[in-house]
């Protein structure tokens, strides 16, 4: 929209026109004069930036309604202030309601003319600002939608990469196939019991759980798949996997929950874990939750050096290690759910496990 612009005074009465001209310009309201409506029409072009027309009733000949309507059609954004003494209020209201004029003011009331002109300028500025802000809003909304699509695309790529990494890791060892998905479900379940309700945080904990052992990609198979007891040097290499995993994917700009699970999932509540020997509440909550979920799956899954154990046995072992290996609050949350529920989660998550174990039996 163009600037609120100048005032055009249209009045056949030269003396009154001159008085109004001096009065308005003296108040800082730029005005110019026109003797007749025909003269005024010639000045209504964009270069002149006329925003308000002050029209005296003496400027018209014939049908006032029709002439004013024609003026408004010629310049729709023009504010028309009609200077006239109209005794018939219905006529005045009709002109305003039909949008032919914006206001009717007595030509003898200078204060009222000033007030009407000022109000029209303010209204035009508000309309102009509204249109500018609306344009900005629409542009921002467009950019937001584009950014949202980009974010959704990136999230899809991220999730796909995460799933591929997890699958690649799990497939290195048929004994632990499905482990990452199972502990991810356990972790989210425990988090909800403890009171974590934020969906974004819960999803980040799921991602961290899926990626927790990504550092094992850098551990040789000769160590990772060894069926005999590991030497102290081999254990030292195994203990590097949280740091290695964190280093492998930190460039993805991990959120805290994801990075904390990868780096701290082998810390113990009593401070005897690794890699940083953090103690109690210095261990991030998501890592304390995951540590129990990880142990639950390890105890109830088949391993080369032992058979899987029952969920009841797992519960007893976890409860016995409350305050040492595990956060007592997390143990309490775990114990509040019947073992059948945890077993059901594992079964629903890793339906392929029986076939994998059959494959192992045939292979051996």
Image (cartoon, grey):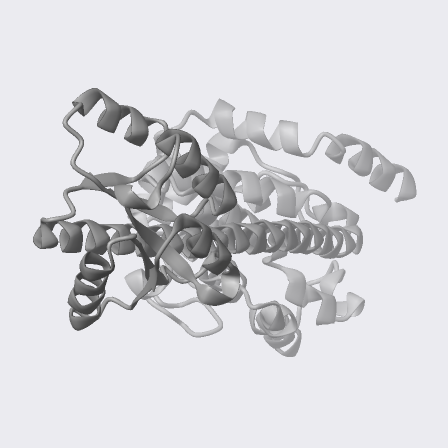
Most distant residue in the bottom direction: 233
Q: Quadrant of residue 4?
A: bottom left
Q: Who is closer to the viewer here, 43 or 279?
A: 43
Q: Quadrant of residue 103?
A: top left
Q: Who is closer to the viewer here, 110 or 207?
A: 110
Q: Who is closer to the viewer here, 306 or 240?
A: 240
Q: Position of residue 324 (x, y in %)?
A: 34, 56
Q: Is residue 49 visible?
A: yes
Rendered residue at 44%/49% (across/down):
201
Question: In this image, 293 relative to 155: left or right?
Answer: left
Q: Who is closer to the viewer here, 34 or 291?
A: 34
**Would you place residue 179 above or below residue 32 in this image?**
above
Q: Quadrant of residue 270?
A: bottom left
Quadrant housing the C terminus: top right
Q: Position of residue 7 (x, y in %)?
A: 32, 60
**Would you place residue 39 above or below residue 97 in this image?**
below
Rendered residue at 40%/59% (across/down):
50
Most distant residue in the right direction: 363
Question: In this image, 327 relative to 306: left or right?
Answer: left
Rendered residue at 22%/20% (across/down):
90
Q: Is residue 316 visible?
A: no
């Amino acid at each position: 929209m163009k600037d609120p612009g100048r005032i055009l005074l249209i009045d056949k009465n030269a003396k009154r026109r001159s008085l109004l001209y001096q009065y308005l310009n003296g108040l800082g309201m730029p005005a110019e004069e026109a003797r007749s409506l025909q003269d005024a029409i010639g000045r209504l072009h964009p270069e002149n930036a006329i925003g308000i027309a002050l029209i005296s009733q003496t400027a018209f000949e014939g049908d006032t309604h029709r002439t004013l309507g024609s003026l408004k059609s010629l310049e729709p954004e023009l504010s028309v202030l009609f200077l006239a003494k109209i005794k018939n209020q219905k006529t005045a209201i009709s002109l305003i309601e039909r949008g032919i004029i914006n206001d009717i003011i007595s030509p003898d009331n200078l204060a009222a003319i000033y007030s009407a002109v000022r109000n029209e300028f303010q209204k035009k500025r508000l309309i102009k600002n509204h249109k500018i802000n609306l344009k900005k809003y629409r542009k921002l909304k467009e950019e937001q939608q584009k950014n949202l699509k980009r974010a959704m695309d990136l999230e899809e790529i991220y999730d796909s990469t995460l799933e591929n990494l997890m699958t690649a890791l799990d497939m290195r060892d048929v004994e632990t196939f499905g482990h990452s998905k199972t502990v991810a479900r356990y972790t989210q379940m425990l988090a909800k019991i403890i009171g974590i309700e934020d969906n974004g945080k819960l999803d980040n904990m799921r991602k961290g759980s899926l990626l927790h052992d990504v550092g094992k990609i850098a551990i040789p198979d000769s160590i990772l798949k060894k069926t005999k007891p590991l030497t102290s040097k081999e254990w030292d290499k195994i203990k590097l996997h949280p740091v290695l995993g964190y280093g492998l994917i930190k460039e993805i700009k991990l959120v805290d929950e994801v990075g904390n699970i990868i780096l701290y999932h082998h810390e113990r509540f009593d401070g005897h874990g690794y890699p940083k020997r953090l103690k109690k509440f210095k261990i991030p909550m998501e890592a304390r939750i995951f540590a129990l979920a990880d142990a639950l799956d390890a105890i109830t899954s088949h391993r080369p050096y032992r058979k899987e154990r029952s969920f009841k046995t797992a519960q007893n072992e976890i409860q016995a290690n409350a305050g040492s290996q595990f956060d007592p609050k997390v143990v309490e949350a775990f114990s509040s759910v019947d073992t059948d529920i945890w077993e059901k989660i594992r079964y629903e998550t890793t339906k392929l496990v029986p076939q994998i174990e059959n494959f192992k039996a045939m292979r051996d």
